[in-house]
Image (cartoon, rainbow, N blue to C red):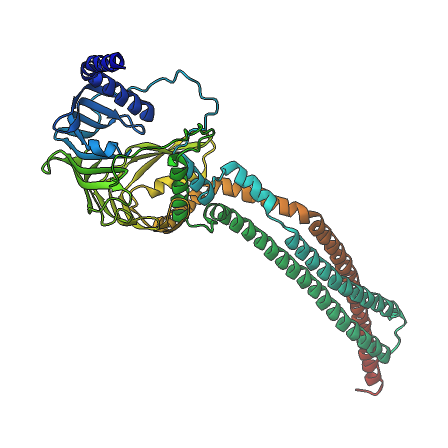
Amino acid sequence: MKYFIKFILIFLVCCIPTWVIFDDVIIKSVIIQLTQKATKKKTNLASVKITYFPELSLTLNDFQCPNPMQQNYVLSAKKLRISIDASALLHQSLVINDIVSMDAIFFDTSSPVYPIKNTVQESSEEPKKTMSIPIKKLVDSAMPVISNSSFANDMKDAVDFSKETDDINAIISSAEDQILSNKNQVLKSLNNSFFELNGLNVSNVSSLDDIRDIQKKLTTLYEYLNQISNKIDDTSLIYKSAQSDIQAVHNEAKEKITSSLSSSILNQSTDNDASISTTLVKNTFDFLIQKFSPKQKKQLRPQFKGTTYRFQTNQPPKFMIRRLTINSPESNQHINGKNIGFGPNITDKMNLLIQFLNQPSYASFLTTVTSDNSKQYAIQSTLKGGRIAQRKLFENDDIRLNFLENKSVSLNILGQISKRSDISALVDIIQPEYRVINKSTNKNAIAGIVPFLNHQDLTFKLDFKGNLSAYEIEASSNLDELVKRVQTAFINKQMSAFKKEQDKIQNEMQLTFIRQTKDSEASFDKRYKKDMNQMTKQKSELTNKLDEITNELNDKKESFKNNIKSELKQSLKTFGF
C-alpha cells in the first residue's frame, strides 16, 4: 500500500505540470469545435490563456465567432476575458462573474467567413426553410396571380347569355303573335273589300240613283281602306318596337360583357376575406417558430443511474452572468448587464442594456431588459433609421419580386416576456422600393400591382400574447387599405392597357351572343317582310281597283250630267226659249 500511495503521488506531480502546459491548447480546441458545430462556419481563435489564481478566468485572443444566418461575424474581439465562479462548478452550475471586452465588434464584415464542409451525409435532411415561405403564402392567399391570357378565356366561358337569348326569343314570339293577328285582320278586310268591289258594275248604271248608290259603297270601301292602312302601320310599329327591344337586349349583353371584363381582375385580385397583415404576421411567426424550435431527438442515450454527490447545500443558479461589459458607453457598440440568467435561485435584479449607434444598416438600436424575479422580463426596444438590405421577396414561374431599398425603418417593442408574454410592436417602413422581373411574357397582376406600392409608407402594429406553443396575435396595418387602393389604381391602368384586347374580346363575345340569336332574328325579319309585302300588295291592288271604279263612275256621272244638260237645252228650244 505504501508503494501504491508513493506511485500516485509521483503520477500527480508529473501530470499537473503537463496539464498546466497543455490546458490552453485543449480549451482552445474545445471552444473552436463547439462554436463551429453550432454555426457550421469556421471559427477563428488565436490563443486562450487560462488563469487559476486568484480566480478562474479565460482570456480569448483574436476571437471571431461566425454568424450562422449571415456572412459576417457575430462577435470579433481582440481580447475577451471571462471570469468563472469555480465553486458553482461543483454544483453543476455555470456562473460567470464577469465578461469584459473593450475592443469588440458585433456583426463584423472586415474579413470573409468560410463555411465548413460536412464530411458526413445526413440521412434525413429537412428542406431548407427561408423567409420566402411566409411571403409566398401571403402572395398566394392575398393577391392571387392573374394571367392575361387565361383571364380572357375564362371570361368567355364564364359569361352566360341564356337569359338574354330567352328575352329575345320572347320578344320575337310576342311580336310575331301580334303581327300575325294584324295580318289576319288585314287580309280578312281586304278579301271582304274585294268581294264588295267586285259586286259593283258601273257599266249597268242607268240613273243618278244608281250612281249615288255606288258612290256610297265606294265611300265605305275607302273607309275600310284607311282602316287597313292603319292596321298595316300598326304592324310596322310592332316590328320596330320589337327591333328596339331586341337592340336593348343586345346592349344589355354588351354591358354585361364590359362589366364582366372590368370586374374579373378586381374580383380575382381583391376578393380575400383574411387580413393581409394578420396573414403575413402569422405565416412569419409560424416560420420562425418552426425554424428555431429545438429538434426532438429520435433516440435518447441510456442515462447512467447513480448518486451525484454535492459538496455544498447552498445552490447557485444553473446559469448566470453577474457582470457583462462590452466596450465603453461612449463607443458605437456597447452592452452592459448585471445578473443575467434564468432560474429561481437568482435573487438580484437583472439589468441589461444593448446600445448600437451609427451602424451600416441602422442609425440607432437601444434595448433594455429588466427583471426583479428572473421569471418575468420587461423589455423595451427601439430601432431608428433602419435600412433593410436588398433581397428577394417572392418568386414563381412568371416573376421575381425583389426588395431594393427603403428610406428608413423604425421599430418599437414594449412588453413583458414570461410564461404568459404580452408584447406590443410597431414598425414603420418609410418609402420602400421594389422591382419586378418578368421571367416570361405572361405578365400577371402581381407584376402590375407591385410598382404602385413603391414609396408608399408601411405601418405594422402587432400585439402578441401567450407563449410560443400557444399564442394569440392581433395585427393591424395600413397594408390592407393600401393594397386595395393600389389594386384599384392598377386595375384602372390595366384596363386601359387592355383596351385593345378588351375590344377584341368584346367583339368576339358579342359575336358569340349574336350567333346564338341570329337565326331567330333572321327568321323574324323574313316573316315580317313577307307578311308586309303580302298586305301592302293586296292593299295596293284594292286601292287601284277602287280608284279605277271611282274614275269610271266619275266619267259615268259626267256623261249623265252632259246628257241632262243637252236634253234640258233641247226642251227649252222647244218651248221657244
Image spot of residue 520 (x, y percent):
71, 51
- Whether residue 385 is visible, yes or no, is no
Q: How many marks?
A: 0
Image spot of residue 20 (x, y percent):
18, 17
Tell me if 331 is positioned left or right of 71 in this view: left
Tell me if 338 is positioned left or right of 398 in this view: left
Which of 104 and 80 lies nearest the eye of the viewer? Answer: 80
Position of residue 364 relative to residue 526, above or below, is above
Name the residue located 30 percent from the left edge and 45 percent from the top edge: 456
Tell me if 280 is positioned left or right of 315 in this view: right
Q: Residue furthest left?
A: 330
Tell me if 168 is positioned left or right of 116 in this view: right
Which of 197 and 520 lies nearest the eye of the viewer? Answer: 520
Q: In the rendered image, which quarter contains the C terminus? A: bottom right
Q: In the rendered image, which quarter contains the N terminus? A: top left
Q: Quadrant of residue 120?
A: top left
Q: Quadrant of residue 105?
A: top left
Name the residue located 32 percent from the left edge and 26 percent from the top edge: 38
Image spot of residue 397 (x, y percent):
47, 30
Q: Residue furthest front?
A: 2
Which of 330 and 516 lies nearest the eye of the viewer? Answer: 330
- Whether residue 454 is visible, yes or no, is yes
Image spot of residue 73 (x, y percent):
24, 26
